[in-house]
Image (cartoon, grey):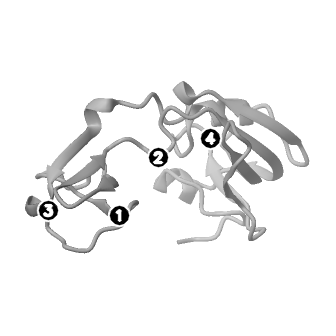
Amino acid sequence: MANPRVVSFLYSLKDPGGNLIDSTDDGEPFSYMEGVGQMIPGLESQMTALNKGDKKTLHVPFAQAYGERDETLVLEVPRDKFPVKELKIGDQFQVGNTPGGPPMTVADFNETTVTLDGNHPLAGVDLTFQVEVVETREATDQELAHGHAHGHHGHDH
């Protein structure tokens, strides 16, 4: 049986309003190994049909990307209980005794409270990817052992 593919592609990612969220604007492709959960499911499932040279617009509904927003993950913390004095929107912190758990992002703050959001920033957002597949190849034994792709040219870590 053949090893899974490593797919390298260039992309731009936009939200429903057409705002650019992310891209490979440096020209360095993003590489992933199929079937190991390195990508959001809705993108990977559509990429399996693509081959080197394919250019396509792929629409991924939020349920197949970062899921629905969960308002129970939005917390208000008294400012005087917060560990730092200087804050800005977008700062991220670990909360409680959950090392490796999802970070909480500062969504808002004022003199008395800090609003923290544990949702992924793209939760609840439908995504549109413009992709161009620049290479597909069989995963190496080392990549299989490590459980992930080693980049566009199969480089080691």
Tell me the residue at 15%/59% (across/down): 79
Tell me which amino acid carries mark 4.
Answer: Glu
Tell me the residue at 8%/60% (across/down): 81
- The residues bearing labels 3 and 1 have C-alpha atoms spaced at a distance of 13 Å
- Badge 4 or badge 3: first in the primary sequence: 4
- Where disc 4 sits, the SS reads loop
Name the residue nearer the viewer: 143 or 32: 32
Do the numbered discs 4 and 2 sit on residues whose CB atoms are within 8 Å?
Answer: no
Name the residue nearer the viewer: 71 or 42: 71
- The residues bearing labels 4 and 2 have C-alpha atoms spaced at a distance of 24 Å
- Compared with residue 68, is residue 50 higher up or lower down, i.e. above or below? below
- The residues bearing labels 1 and 2 have C-alpha atoms spaced at a distance of 12 Å
Q: Which residue is mark 3?
A: 82
Position of residue 62 measured from the top left corner of the image (x, y, whole percent): 56, 29
Tell me which amino acid carries mark 2.
Answer: Pro
- Compared with residue 25, is residue 138 higher up or lower down, i.e. above or below? above
- The residues bearing labels 2 and 3 have C-alpha atoms spaced at a distance of 22 Å
- Compared with residue 100, is residue 88 higher up or lower down, i.e. above or below? below
Position of residue 3 measured from the top left corner of the image (x, y, whole percent): 65, 42
- Badge 3 or badge 1: first in the primary sequence: 3
Which label belongs to residue 21? none
Q: Which residue is mark 2?
A: 121
Q: Which residue is mark 1?
A: 91
- Where disc 1 sits, the SS reads loop
Q: Which residue is mark 4?
A: 34
